[in-house]
Image (spheres, rainbow, N blue to C red):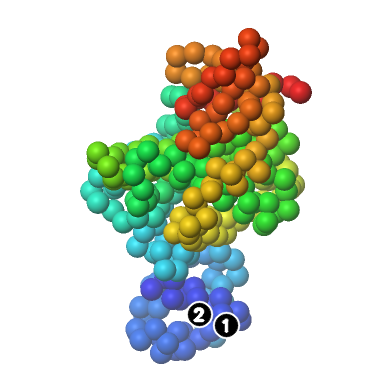
Amino acid sequence: MKGRILKILRDKKGTVSGQALSDELGVSRVSVWKHIQKLQALGYEIDATTRGYRLDHSPDVPYPWEFPGRESKIFYYPELPSTMDTAKDLARKGCLHFTTIVAGRQLSGRGRLKREWLSEEGGLYFTMVLRPDLPPVLSFRVGFLASLTLARLLNEIFKIEVRVKWPNDLLVNERKICGMLSELEAEADRVAFINMGIGLNVNNDPSTIEPTATSLKMILGHNVSKKEILSRYLDLFETRMQSAAYDDVIEQWKQYTVTLNRHVRVVTTRDVFTGIAVDIDGTGALVLKCADGSKKIIHYGDCFHQSR
Ligand code: BTN
């Protein structure tokens, strides 16, 4: 009902009478008024007079009804320990492909290699439960597709140069703007689910804690809509996941990366390697050429670009 009321108010733009809303929605005027009050309590600025209702401002909060067609698959929480934990519970209970858990902020946000992920108000923090039709050995493609799709979308919306860094960070001018974390559960020959968690710095300022990080607001100088980014991203990523183009995702990703032909330091759970990143192989692994001429194939780790 909230989504339908908002749609009418947005389509008509000006003031809509209580009677017109009640006729169009097929509910009483009292019921309309109760829903309006709930929307107001959630941050929607709705001017209510004897002439009717006018929507003046919507909060930038990804409430489920802001995602027509996906309402039942969006779970929004103002605050969570980590969207990864909630996603895992829902995935194990059998939730649908592309169920998405979004948090306004996270109290124990998790990064890769057991790091903490600062998740203050203003950033976009979400985890998608994905059930791709892929054997576990090809599941790495999903992470590459997720980062490539988001980089392209941010380039398109904001006209900024977003690039990908192995394995799936997003950078702008060498500063990290987004990190991704994936967790997989599989049976012998089939992926049960991949939970893809994304932390995008949008209207927050991460540089006070992490000097090498940036956000969309820091780059553009103004706030932008998290709701719009999420809505467009889910639509685009879901479409891309269905398409055949996904077969050559590594090749496409390589066109978008700033990791190749760079001196890098790669930290894995056990070792630290340095060398020149010469390729991303067909399994998504980083191929490193070490100083002694040997090659190292690294499947999982964190990569730090050294100054040129
Ligand atoms: C990294 O770069 O180390 C990965 C960061 C991933 C952060 C996101 S925010 C949403 C989801 N929930 C978490 O606790 N982590 C991921």
- Residue 190 in which image quadrant: top left
Residue 225 on image: x %, y %? 60, 56
Which image quarter is the N terminus in?
Answer: bottom left
Apparent side of residue 113 relative to residue 275 in the rendered image (left or right): left
Q: Position of residue 265 (x, y in %)?
A: 61, 19
Residue 98: where, in percent of width, then height? 39, 55
Q: What residue lies at 27% left-to-right and 42% top-to-bottom?
A: 189
Q: Secondary structure at mark 2?
A: helix
User: Which residue corresponds to the image point at 55% horizontal and 28% vertical from the top-left?
Assistant: 286
Do the residues under discs 1 and 2 have CB atoms within 8 angstroms?
Answer: yes
Name the residue: 35% across, 78% down.
31
From the image, tell me which residue sits under label 1. 12
Q: Amino acid at mark 2?
A: Ile
Does the beta carbon of the residue at mark 2 sit less than 8 Å from ligand 1?
Answer: no
Q: Residues within 10 Å of mark 1 (few under 14, many from 20)?
A: few
Give the residue at mark 2.
8
Q: Foreground residue, 279 or 156? A: 279
